[in-house]
Image (cartoon, coloured by chain):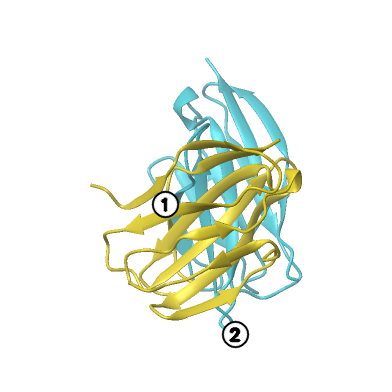
Chain colours: A yellow, B cyan
Amino acid sequence: NAGVTQTPKFQVLKTGQSMTLQCAQDMNHEYMSWYRQDPGMGLRLIHYSVGAGITDQGEVPNGYNVSRSTTEDFPLRLLSAAPSQTSVYFCASSFQAGTGIYFGDGTRLSIL
Amino acid sequence: TQLLEQSPQFLSIQEGENLTVYCNSSSVFSSLQWYRQEPGEGPVLLVTVVTGGEVKKLKRLTFQFGDARKDSSLHITAAQPGDTGLYLCAGAQSSNYKLTFGKGTLLTVNP
């Protein structure tokens, strides 16, 4: 029962480095999204996709890029890491937008 | 930005007690969802409510959606230590595809 798989689980970066957080789902869900979770801030939407080839910005998109070339994969790219991007990142998917979503276990990212 | 306010922010109770947590907004939602998150894991969907006034039960958990679809409550009967976790509500609006999350209620049930 894979569901939503995120890699890596933990990552430490230096300021200015770039990296890609991977997300894959095996449920044939059209809708996928990325959230960050910070203490006192709750879950905030970074980017989302309603299907392959379609992406849009969420609440906090600056500093992040996404693409959706397949239904299964939705990678999140940090272009030039900053300490403010230290957070726990969650990828999620659902059968259709606006319904209950399934989360991965998260990537814990620290930017030094 | 539509806000969902959850209360209380923290709740610590003894095993066997009952509790209610609340999720309130000034916005109308087409559906509202409740999630539970345990440390080191992603949130797990508990229930989705879509009709004003709807009540759903999941074992000892009772979820209610307000008549005006602006608020919801989660009631737990005879809480157990396994209920410990962060409870999150999230609202969806029919006008867009985005879920808005509350900041959560951190529940601790002591044995």
Query: The disc numbered 2 marks a residue on which chain?
Result: B
Looking at the image, which is closer to me, A111 or A54? Answer: A111
Does residue A26 sit above or below A10 in this rendering? below
Question: In this rendering, do the residues under marks 1 and 2 share a single chain?
Answer: yes
SS of the residue under disc 2: loop
Q: Position of residue A68 (x, y in %)?
A: 42, 72
Name the residue carrying label 1.
B57
> In the rendering, which numbered label is found on residue A56?
none
Name the residue carrying label 2.
B95
Which of pointers 1 and 2 indicates the residue nearer the eye? 2
Amino acid at dot 1: Lys
Looking at the image, which is closer to me, B63 or A41? Answer: A41
Q: Residue at x 44, y 56 (%)?
A: B47
SS of the residue under disc 1: strand
Amino acid at dot 2: Ser
Looking at the image, which is closer to me, B96 or A82? Answer: A82
